[in-house]
Image: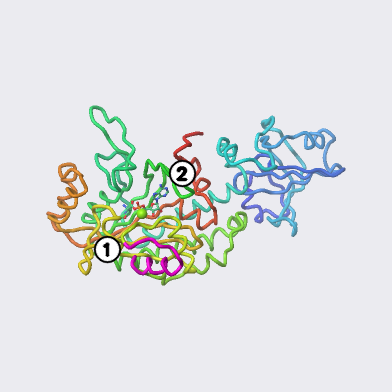
Amino acid sequence: MADRVWIEDISKHEGKEVLLQGWLYNKRSSGKLHFLQVRDGTGIIQCVVFKGDVSPELFDLADRISQESAIEVSGIVKKDERSPLGFELGVSHLDLVHEAPDYPITPKDHGISFLMDHRHLWLRSSRQHAILRIRHEVIRAVRDFFDGKGFTLLDAPIFTPNACEGTTNLFSTEYFETRAYLTQSGQLYNEAGAMAFGKVYCFGPTFRAEKSKTRRHLTEFWMVEPEMAYCDLNQDMDLAEEFVEYVVQQVVRNRPNELKDVERDIEVLKKVKRPFPRISYSEAIEILHRKGNSTPWGEDLGGDEETLISEEFDRPVMIHRYPAKCKAFYMKGDPDNPDTALCVDMLAPEGYGEIIGGGQREDDYETLKDRILHHGLSPEVFGWYLDLRKYGSVPHAGFGLGIERAVAWICGLKHVRETIPFPRMMERLTP
Ligand code: 4AD
Ligand code: MG
C-alpha cells in the first residue's frame, strides 16, 4: 500500500503513488470523470476518477459518495497548473470509511445563526479553516516575539477575588463558601511578575460579561499581556508598535494562501510598518470636531469615534493620555496634566477599532490606595497588589492585545465571532 501523506506536502510526492485520508468536500461529474474535492485538514486536492482507470464498482462508488463522508483515496500525484494547489491526484483506489448522510452545510448560502448553531461542522469549511489557521499563526508570532525578547511566560489565574477592569462586566461564580470572579485581565498578577522577573507576559482566556451585542465583543476572549519593570509610557508604545508590526508581517509571510482564501488585500497589511502615528486624546478630539463629530473633551471614545479617527491613517494609530476618569483605577496620572492618564489605546486601521489597551501603572503606594478607595474597591482585597508599591516599587508598564480583534482585522472580517473556534457571546453558549 502507498504511504499516507498530507495534502499540504503533496508537492514533495509528484509522480508517486500516495494514500490520502480525509473527507469528501465537494464533487462534480462529467460522463467518464468524477472530480472529488478531498480535504484532510491541511488542504483540499482534486482527485480525478477516470472510468477507464478503475473498476465499475469503484467508479459507481465515486458517483454515490456523499459530502463529508470519510474516505481513503490513493493514486498518482500529477502536476496541474489550473488547480490552486498546483497538483491533482489520478485515483486508483477509493475506500469509504464512513458514510455521512445529509450533511447540513451544503455549498449553498446559509444564514449566520444556522452556521453558528452548526459551528462544530462549520469549522470544516475552507474559509473558516483559513481564518483559524491565521489565528494560529498570530498566536505563534505572539509567542515567538516575546520569547525572542527574553520575556518569561507567567500564567495568571482565571479565578480571582477582585476586579481588574471595573465591576460592571464581571462574571461571578460560587467558590466553596465564598465568591470568585472570572478574570478580566491578567495584568495585576503580571505586575507582581514584572517585579520578580523584569519582563513577563501572560496569555490566556479572559472574561467580560459584556451586555453589548456588537461585532467587537465576546464574553470569553484571549488576551496576551506583556508587563515590564523600569518601563514608561513611551517605551511601552515602542514595544506595542514593534510587536504589532511583527505579528502582521509574520502572517503576511507565512499565511499567504489563507489570506487569499479570506480575500484579504495583502497590500494593506504590508503597510503595517513602524513608526505608527501617536496622537494624544486631545488631538483625537480635535480630529473628531474637524470631521463633524461633537464628542466633548472628557468623554470616552466609542466605536464610531474610533472609526472616524482610524480613517485618517493607513496604519494603526496610538492614542495616549485619555482623561483619567475614563480609565481603570491602576493607571498612573500624567504629572504634566493630572486629569489625564499615562495610558494608550491602539486602533487598527480600516475602522477595526481598539486592538490594544495599556499604559503605565500607578507606582506610588498612597496614590494607588486613594484611587482604590475612590473607585469603591476594597483595600483589603488589593492588599497584595499594594504590597508591590511597598517593596521596591519602580515605574512599570504593559498592555493587552485581544487576539480575536487582531485576527478580525488581519483577516478583514466584520465580526469577531468567526475568529475563535467556539465563540461565546451574550446570546451564544452553544455548541
Ligand atoms: O482595554 P482592555 O480592557 O485592557 C486591559 O484589560 C488591560 N488590563 C490590559 C493590560 O494593560 N495588560 O482590553 C485589552 C484588549 C482590548 O484592546 C481588546 O483588543 C480586547 O482586549 N478586548 C476584547 N476583545 C473581545 N471582546 C471583548 N469583550 C473585549 N474586551 C477587550
Ligand atoms: Mg480598552
Please state the horizontal and vertical placement of residue 352, each as a whole percent of the image. Answer: 48, 57
Which comes sooner in the sequence, label 1 or label 2?
Answer: 2
Q: Residue at x 30, y 58 (%)?
A: 398
| Residue 288 occupies quadrant | bottom left
Q: Quadrant of the N terminus?
A: top right
**Within 10 Å of the Cα at label 2, are there few (<14), some (14-19), or many (20+) other Cα atoms?**
few
User: How is colour applied across the structure in the image?
Assistant: rainbow
User: Circle 1 sits in a helix, a strand or a loop, which is it?
Assistant: loop
Q: Residue at x 66, y 48 (%)?
A: 44
How many discs appear? 2
Q: Which residues are magenta?
A: 281-297
- Residue under label 1: 342
Residue receiving disc 2: 213
Residue 431 tag number: none
- Whole-percent x, y for residue 119 in the image: 56, 38
| 78 magenta-colored | no
Q: Position of residue 235 (x, y in %)?
A: 30, 67
Tag nearer the camera, 1 or 2: 2
Vertical side of 240 occupied by 41: above or below: above
Specify the amino acid type for callout 1: Leu
Residue 287 is a magenta residue:
yes
Residue 123 point in image, percent of width and height: 57, 42
- Left or right of 160 in this view: 54: right
- Label 2 amino acid? Lys
Ligand 1 within 8 Å of the CB at mark 1: no
126 displayed left or right of 296: right
Determine the residue positioned at 26% across, 65% down.
Answer: 232
Judge left or right: residue 369 versus residue 322: left
